[in-house]
Image (cartoon, rainbow, N blue to C red):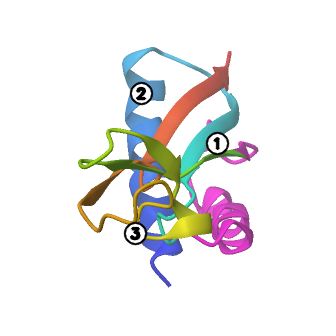
């Protein structure tokens, strides 16, 4: 379960941001996960809800909000993009295997709601 490791890393970063900016409470953290990042969002929420209770008071009520980044692949042969999950590695436009993932495997902290 790598979700717990991701949660710990994100909470460490948010805690440092709270300290640096003298925030008293983090109400929510919005994270972005690529469609092919391998993150199971239900496990992220479960791990988050457990881990925030073990953190300083500034984080203990922080809600996790999740946004998904669609996976998009680029074809070197025809110079077009297509939805990765639907078509995989082979370009549906020209059948070329000369493709690469353009986006969709990211894991980002996008936004904090704090006061």
**What residue is disc 2 on?**
17
Residue 106: horizontal and vertical position, in percent? 42, 49
Helix, strand or loop at label 3? It is loop
Can you say whether 80 is above or below 68 in the image? above
- Residue extending furthest bottom? 1
Circle 1 or circle 3, nearest the eye = 3
Q: Give the side of residue 111 with respect to residue 113, left or right.
A: left
Q: Which residues are magenta?
A: 39-65
How many dots with numbers? Answer: 3
Which residue is nearer to you in this view: 89 or 61? Answer: 89
For the residues bearing labels 3 and 2, Cβ distance under 8 angstroms: no
Q: Quadrant of the C terminus?
A: top right
Instruction: Check disc 3: other Cα within 10 Å, few if <14, some if 14-19, many if 20+.
Output: some
Where is residue 98 shown, x and y percent of the image?
23, 61
Residue 58 in percent (x, y) is at: 62, 36
Q: Residue at x 55, y 67 (%)?
A: 87
Please rate how many residues cluster around mark 2, counting C-alpha atoms within 10 Å: few if below 14, some from 14 to 19, many from 20: few
Q: Is residue 51 magenta?
A: yes
Q: Earlier in the sequence, mark 3 or mark 2?
A: 2
Q: Nearer the viewer, mark 3 or mark 2?
A: 3
Residue at the disc numbered 1: 57
Q: Which mark is residue 38?
A: none
């Amino acid at each position: 379960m790598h979700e717990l490791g991701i949660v710990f890393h994100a909470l460490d970063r948010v805690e440092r941001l709270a300290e640096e900016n003298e925030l008293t409470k983090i109400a929510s953290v919005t994270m972005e996960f690529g469609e092919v990042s391998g993150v199971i969002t239900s496990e992220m929420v479960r791990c988050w809800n457990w881990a925030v209770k073990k953190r300083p008071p500034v984080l203990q009520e922080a809600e996790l909000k999740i946004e998904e980044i669609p996976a998009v692949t680029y074809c070197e042969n025809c110079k077009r993009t297509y939805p990765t999950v639907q078509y995989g590695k082979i370009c549906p436009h020209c059948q070329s295997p000369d493709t690469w993932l353009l986006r969709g495997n990211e894991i980002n902290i996008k936004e904090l709601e704090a006061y």
